[in-house]
Amino acid sequence: MKTIRLKPGKERSLLRRHPWVFDGAVAKGSADPGETVRVDDAEGRFLAWGACSPASKIRVRAWSFEQAQRIDAAFFRERLRAAIALRERLAVASDGVRLVHAEADGLPGLVVDRYGDTLVAQFGAAGVERWKGVIADALLELTGLSRLYERSDTSSRQLEGLPEATGWLRGGGDTALVLQEHGWKLGLDVALGHKTGYYLDQRDNRGLCRELVQRYGLAEVLNCYSYTGGFTVAALAGGAQRVVSVDSSGPALQQAAANVALNGLDAARCEWLDADVNATLRRFVEQGRQFDAIVLDPPKLAPTAAHAERAARAYKDINRLGFKLLKPGGLLLTFSCSGGVGVELFHKIVASAGIDAGVDGVFLQRMGGAPDHPMTVQFPEGEYLKGLVVMRRPTA
């Protein structure tokens, strides 16, 4: 067994069971990509077993902090069993569920989603890549399913020195599926869709959108970065009379329209704009248009803290425009999925945007990822999705 020895004073994070060892903390030692290594402090005392990633700034991702633990097929089967058991306990009201959430489930780099009878996995680090076959077999055994599609096409693979890999790992068949949640259906394609096929992390927030539209009687809704229309369907299901959906992807908008039809909702209440969101928001401000509710769910703008300043400017700009387009008493549902922008920073950005827009806003609620996308006390970096519900104060 090869050993990675840390520099003096660099053991604190592992003692607190944080799963990452950065390259700057390593005094000596290396191994092949994904190879299991022992991590010791500067005095040679055991800290963790982990997977080496020699091409990455995250040099080691910890598997276990127990010296007696063997890292073998049985280890991975037990970690997967525990992750799946947690989701069963959560009793998610959907057939689209995040079964494995990487570090939060003790399996750094591994994401597994279930869409009905199909599993989709992303192997985002050298360690899980090395154990791919073992993991694939265990997943099928534990779930009783026979179809597993790989979507290892994330940017993290490049940072690990790994090529993209997509396709059926086990089984085969059609990659176009239908997801069910909150009593509605959403069509998706696990081979072509974003992430593993869809944004399961926003499931509860889509349900909240329907609830808010119903509760406040929000008639006209603007859904920005609408993708395939999850929030559009939610707003229509809540009784919205008109939903304007804006996205720069024509195929995504076509799927969104198909999702409206799939649920038997009134297509006449929909307006589809294949356009740049920022330009559209500015045009609407110039036209004096206003909405009862606005959803802002942009793509990731700050993957790391190094990108936070630039991302903050972009987030502030779209939220400022969003505030200007809100009717008095209207609701802004605004999100950030950028890991480099923390919860408090995002709150400050949105507050500053409201002030610059001259809007008296009231923060009603904070939002986050669905509970099957857990965050652990040892790994706060897992909290990437954050959102706010802000009401423009009604006029007297």
Image (cartoon, rainbow, N blue to C red):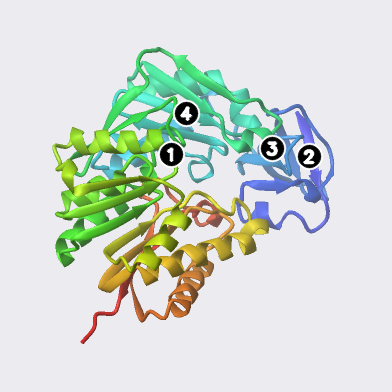
Secondary structure beneath dot 1 equals loop
Which residue is pictured at 25% across the width and 52% down the height? 243
Pointer 3 and pointer 1: residues touching (CB < 8 Å)?
Answer: no
Pointer 1 local density, CA inside 10 Å: few below 14, some 14–19, many at least 20: some
- Residue 113 placed where, x, y %? 40, 33
Q: Which tag is nearer the camera, tag 4 or tag 1?
A: 1
Secondary structure beneath dot 3 equals helix
Indicate the amino acid at tag 1.
Ser
Residue 378: in sight, yes or no?
no
For mark 3, what is the residue? Answer: 159
The CA span between labels 3 and 1 is 27 Å
Marking on residue 161: none
* Quadrant position of residue 326: bottom left
| N-terminal-most mark, 2 or 3 | 2
For mark 1, what is the residue? Answer: 249
The CA span between labels 3 and 4 is 18 Å
For mark 4, what is the residue? Answer: 121
The CA span between labels 2 and 1 is 46 Å
Which residue is pictured at 44% across the width and 43% down the height? 248
Is residue 92 found left or right of 33 in the rendered image?
Answer: left
| N-terminal-most mark, 2 or 1 | 2
The CA span between labels 2 and 3 is 20 Å
Is residue 383 found left or right of 251 in the rendered image?
Answer: right
Which residue is pictured at 72% across the width and 37% down the height? 38
